[in-house]
Amino acid sequence: MTCPSRVRVVEVGPRDGLQNEPVIVPADVKVALIEALAGAGVTTIEAGSFVSPRWVPQMADTADVLARLRSMPGVSLPVLVPNLQGLDRALAAGVREIAVFGAASESFSRRNINCSIAESFDRFAPVAGAARAAGLRVRGYVSCVLGCPYEGDVSADAVAKVAAALLAMGCYEISLGDTIGTGTPREARQLIERVAADVPIDRLALHFHDTYGQALANILACLDLGVSVVDAAVVGLGGCPYARGATGNVATEDLVYMLDGMGIETGIDLHALARAGQSISRHLDREPASKVARAMAATADP
């Protein structure tokens, strides 16, 4: 098995994770979490989103969070932007990278953003174009790549079509999301092989949720194909408001522990990462979903 010597971990907990919390997490807590993650060595951290506060109230304070963050050279803080209004707000906040979000399932697209896949690209194309014209980097997400809560199986051809469209739109990287966490290793590997026929492998990232406990196995199955970017959420934060029962992304602690054990560099200090996770877990008043975080807390003070 030939794996990359280094994996870039994209931390999505402060956005993808906290946006699914039933209560509003204060801006100062979000700022502390982001700064702790950066202090642990994470170089890409989703800091929030400029979506309608009516739809995602947990992200209404993203501009405030960004304004409060201290300077962190070498750390990218992308935000999710669904439309031109959101882009205007992101630009006003000094954002240097945004993300746009599509789906490989027609039903999920209509339930999630109230439009078809084709209509979603009509929305995203001007956003991506305007962002790139302003000097911003644009990352693309594809949800439901290994299953949909409404349609069941999703074809790899459909995923490849959406990923290729995002690439043509100017996205520097396409993150493939197993939104409901139903994928298994062979399926995950076959998906990457199919999408890589249309999108260069070095432009792909993995975003696997752990609903059925398969996320790490799925990531491992794809590493030797050349994928070297993986999304993760500290203490396994997250879920999906449109997919009942879907749990959070793979826990960053679990991912880093596995990669460390394989001799794959991430630049992340696992103990500092665990401390960041413990802090947000205390605020949320619950145990972390990360097995590594729980084991470290039980055996020693990280």
Image: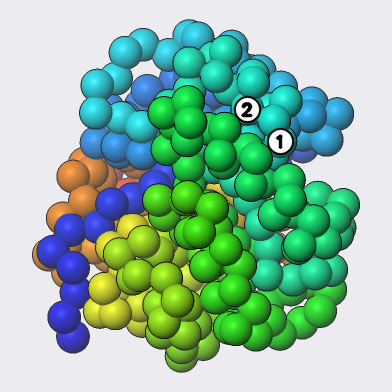
Q: Residues within 10 Å of mark 2 (few under 14, many from 20)?
A: many
Q: In the image, is 142 to the left or to the right of 192?
A: right
Q: Nearer the viewer, residue 225 or 90?
A: 90
- Residue at horizontal 80 percent and vertical 69 percent from the top: 106
Q: Which mark is residue 87?
A: 2
Residue 243 at least partly seen: no
Which quarter of the rendered picture does the N terminus lie within?
bottom left
* Identity of the residue drawn at 57% across and 63% down: 165
Q: Are marks 1 and 2 in contact (CB under 8 Å)?
A: yes
Whether residue 262 is visible: yes
Residue drawn 18% across the image and 45% down it: 267
The vertical placement of 240 against 130, above or below, is below
Of residues 203 and 265, the one nearer the viewer is 203
How far across and how far down the image is residue 211, in percent?
62, 68
Identify whether 172 is placed above or below 187.
above
Q: Residues within 10 Å of mark 1 (few under 14, many from 20)?
A: some
C-alpha separation, residue under disc 1 versus residue under disc 2: 6 Å
Tell me which amino acid carries mark 2: Leu
User: Quarter holding the C terminus?
Assistant: top left
Mark carried by residue 83: 1
Q: Which corner quadrant of the image does residue 19 belong to?
A: top right
Question: Callout 1: helix, strand or loop?
Answer: loop
How far across and down, in percent of the image, does residue 250 sit?
48, 59
